[in-house]
Image: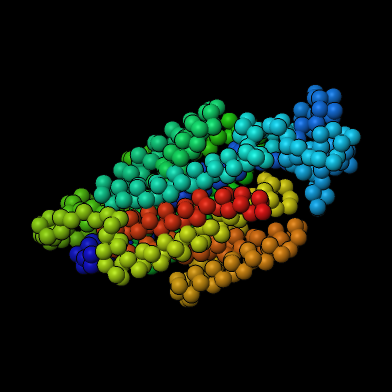
């Protein structure tokens, strides 16, 4: 699994970053843009608004007018609904009657939702609040569980069957399941569709597209290209806020999210297979053909005299290196095993904090659409900072600094009352965690050899999704304390 000097010589003929790499990289970036959009789409497809118990004396009398604007005034409802210690209405309990406030009772499945912000939501359809709020947390976890499996399985499959093939298959199925999710009326079937949606949408296509770019560009440019992937993901998140603000019908909104997957349908004809992967599989002639095409696109001469050397190398690889590498190879040698475990744990920790902030922007004060947009946009300064200083500081020190700043900021927010200050500190934490992701993606891709690089990135992405999968459950647990 050492570096092949013949392969490096072949890649060197392409140049560091020319027209060919730019075109391919932009096409790869679309996978990150879609992953960001799909990952956070539930924030507005299934938002949880302010809600309370149905009060017959108030809501039945005003059923027509309150269908759009139900009463949530604490002074009006204080005789019917108990108040929390902070003076807010209890969302899940009511008094037996206006004249009996000695005991409280549950809403018995009858709720009134404040639709002034969210006109529609999947939460309304299945009443995923109060004793059923675990269902809302579960659908987010199931989506991320799909990403978890997609990162692992698609990563391993692309090491065996090729990056391009797995990316194109993922593109088709992410469109299919994203579109299905808009029309499924059953909760269980919806959960199953979300799993597949996450598997192909934010799992298979994203990881494969990232590795394709990292294997194409020169080492000196990987920091910029990897950071561009993170920025593209953040752009997708911003588009979630934009489309959600413009489209309040959640069925149409989900269809719009699904239609974006069509951006990848031309990739079968537009992108090339990884030269490094083809070389690692002994498919030397195919690798040389793509390299020749790339060199010509970049306006560089190509040394055809290498063909005989490459043919000799192919024969050597076919006879001496027939082993197919996969996920298990990450744990066979002490050095690679330590790297795999270390990077996977870092990805898990970063994701737990990053998605804890991203999934809960609705809890921050302010217009939810604007706050969500700013939370996505806040990732970009973190990415820019990485580009400016990472080559001076190195990957490890910069990553450690981001982890420290983000962790401290998250802890501080727990001791500050809700307001502009806590929102600002949360944004600082978001910037730091975005910077962590930008660094760790590049760092991981550089730490592992070509034949197991996609498996390594897939394993780490899987660990990150485990953090994202646990985030809604941890939030649910904290809210119940």
- The residue under the point 50% across, 32% down is 188
Residue 371 shows in the view: no
Q: Residue 9 at x, y = what percent? A: 23, 65
Tell me if 388 is positioned left or right of 87 in this view: left
Tell me if 387 is positioned left or right of 93 in this view: left
Way the structure is coloured:
rainbow
Q: Residue 85 at x, y = what percent? A: 81, 52
Tell me if 274 is positioned left or right of 436 in this view: left
Q: Residue 415 at x, y = what percent? A: 71, 64
Image position of 329 with respect to 201: above or below: below
Closer to the camera in the image, 265 or 184 = 184
- The residue under the point 75% across, 57% down is 418
- The residue under the point 54% across, 41% down is 139
Closer to the camera in the image, 92 or 211 = 92
Residue 281 shows in the view: yes
The number of numbered discs placed on residues in the rendered structure image is 0
Q: Residue 209 at x, y = what percent? A: 39, 50
Rendered-image quadrant of the C terminus: bottom right
- When asked about the image quadrant of residue 168, the answer is top left
Rendered-image quadrant of the N terminus: bottom left
- The residue under the point 69% across, 51% down is 363
């Amino acid at each position: 699994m050492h570096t092949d000097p013949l392969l490096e010589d072949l890649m060197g003929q392409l140049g560091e970053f020319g027209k060919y790499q730019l075109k391919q990289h932009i096409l790869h970036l679309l996978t990150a843009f879609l992953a960001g959009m799909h990952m956070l789409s539930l924030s507005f497809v299934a938002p949880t608004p302010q809600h309370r118990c149905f009060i017959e004396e108030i809501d039945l009398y005003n059923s027509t007018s309150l269908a759009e604007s139900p009463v949530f005034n604490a002074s009006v409802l204080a005789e019917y609904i108990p108040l929390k210690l902070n003076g807010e209405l209890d969302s899940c309990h009511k008094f037996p009657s206006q004249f009996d406030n000695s005991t409280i009772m549950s809403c018995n499945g009858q709720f009134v939702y404040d639709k002034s912000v969210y006109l529609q939501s999947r939460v309304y359809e299945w009443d995923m609040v109060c004793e059923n709020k675990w269902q809302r947390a579960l659908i987010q976890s199931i989506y991320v569980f799909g990403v978890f499996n997609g990162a692992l399985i698609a990563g391993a499959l692309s090491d065996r069957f090729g990056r391009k093939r797995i990316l194109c298959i993922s593109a088709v199925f992410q469109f299919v399941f994203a579109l299905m999710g808009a029309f499924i009326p059953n909760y269980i079937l919806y959960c199953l569709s979300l799993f597949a949606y996450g598997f192909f949408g934010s799992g298979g296509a994203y990881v494969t597209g990232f590795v394709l770019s990292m294997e194409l560009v020169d080492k000196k440019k990987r920091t910029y290209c990897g950071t561009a992937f993170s920025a593209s993901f953040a752009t997708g998140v911003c588009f979630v806020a934009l489309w959600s603000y413009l489209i309040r019908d959640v069925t149409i909104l989900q269809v719009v999210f699904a239609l974006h997957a069509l951006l990848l349908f031309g990739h079968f004809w537009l992108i090339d297979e990884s030269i490094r992967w083809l070389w690692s599989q002994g498919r030397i002639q195919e690798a040389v053909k793509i390299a020749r095409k790339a060199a010509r696109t970049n306006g560089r001469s190509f040394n055809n005299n290498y063909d005989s050397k490459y043919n000799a190398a192919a024969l050597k690889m076919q006879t001496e290196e027939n082993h197919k590498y996969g996920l298990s190879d990450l744990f066979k040698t002490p050095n690679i095993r330590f790297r795999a475990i270390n990077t996977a744990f870092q990805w898990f920790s970063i994701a737990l904090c990053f998605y804890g902030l991203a999934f809960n922007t609705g809890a921050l004060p302010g217009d939810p659409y604007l706050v969500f947009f700013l939370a996505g946009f806040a990732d970009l300064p973190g990415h820019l900072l990485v580009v400016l200083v990472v080559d001076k500081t190195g990957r490890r020190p910069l990553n450690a600094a981001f982890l420290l700043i983000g962790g401290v900021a998250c802890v501080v927010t727990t001791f500050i009352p809700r307001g502009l200050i806590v929102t600002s500190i949360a944004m600082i934490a978001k910037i730091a965690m975005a910077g962590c992701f930008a660094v760790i993606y590049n760092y991981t891709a550089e730490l592992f050899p070509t034949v197991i690089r996609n498996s390594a990135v897939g394993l780490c992405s899987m660990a990150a999704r485990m953090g994202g999968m646990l985030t809604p459950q941890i939030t649910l647990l904290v809210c119940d304390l």
